[in-house]
Image (spheres, rainbow, N blue to C red):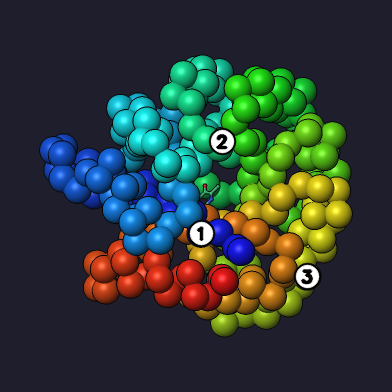
Amino acid sequence: MKRLGVNIDHIATLRNARGENHPDPFFAAKFAKKCGADSITIHLREDRRHIKDLDAKKICSVKKLLVNLEISTNYKIIRNALRIKPNYVCLVPENRKEITTEGGLNLKKNKDKIKKIIEKFKRQKIRTSLFINPSISDIKIAKKLKTDCIEIHTGHLANLIKNKKRYNNEFQRIKKASLLASNLNIEVHAGHGLDYKTTKVLTKIKEIKEYNIGHFIIGESIYFGLSKIIKRFRKIIK
Ligand code: PXP
């Protein structure tokens, strides 16, 4: 069974636009699970532009809710994440000025730091994942760092498909990277910029076990409701 992780960061974006309490990411997390999400993803950014510490704490305290916490490698964020105790963490690169996560981690440059971070989470039995570009050399480094999973940044593929450009080269890169990771016993996830069509394309890669999707799900829910959208994605990835 393939899994669907629903990223609810933008429920918090909407809440923060008014500086009040509605819509509440805590309620949204529980509701998304009820609608069929296998896990909930939240990104506790260094600038706290959407999810706040209290949101993360409350959401991670819900029993039977699997929470994937996306975090940068900043030591204060790592310290917070170790206290918050999510079920899963996904390390992502972060740049204050970016609108959203622009690319994968630079594993080559940061391998020692990332290795130590992975060890810390593993000691607490928290599943680890690294958000990376579909690169063979990064998969080999990821293996050495002993991560449980990798999440392949699908933003480039998604942009090519949405702009009706040729996407086969990028698709093949993702496929080769997924195959290698899977052969090395690293679980493969995919995320960023995914909608119905881009997700459908990726389902041809059977090594991808989990999809983490946020902006499109929340945006589309305005028209059709969260429950319908989650059910439609579940049908696509099954
Ligand atoms: N996966 C990771 C690691 C991300 O950083 C993001 C964006 O926060 C997503 C998935 C979800 O991307 P999108 O909101 O474009 O679906």
Which residue is labeled 1 in the image? 4
Task: Tell me if mark 1 has few (under 14), some (14-19) or many (20+) residues whose alpha carbon lies within 10 angstroms of its own.
Answer: many
Percent position (x, y) of residue 48? 36, 32
Instruction: Using the numbered discs, state the Cα–Cα distance from disc 3 to disc 2 in whole angstroms.
Output: 27 Å
Asked if residue 77 shows in the view, the reply is: no
Q: Amino acid at mark 2?
A: Val
Mark 1 or mark 3, which is nearer the start of the sequence? 1
Report helix, strand or loop for mark 1.
Answer: strand
Residue 172, numbered label: 3
Percent position (x, y) of residue 108? 79, 35
Asked if residue 212 shows in the view, the reply is: yes
Percent position (x, y) of residue 112? 77, 23
In depth, the one of 81 and 158 nearer the eye is 81
Q: Residue, x 57% and y 71% (percent of image)? A: 238
In depth, the one of 5 and 155 nearer the eye is 5
Q: Amino acid at mark 3?
A: Gln
Q: Nearer the viewer, mark 3 or mark 2?
A: 2
Which residue is labeled 2 in the image? 89
Q: Is residue 80 left or right of residue 73?
A: left
In depth, the one of 148 and 15 nearer the eye is 148
Report helix, strand or loop for mark 2.
Answer: strand
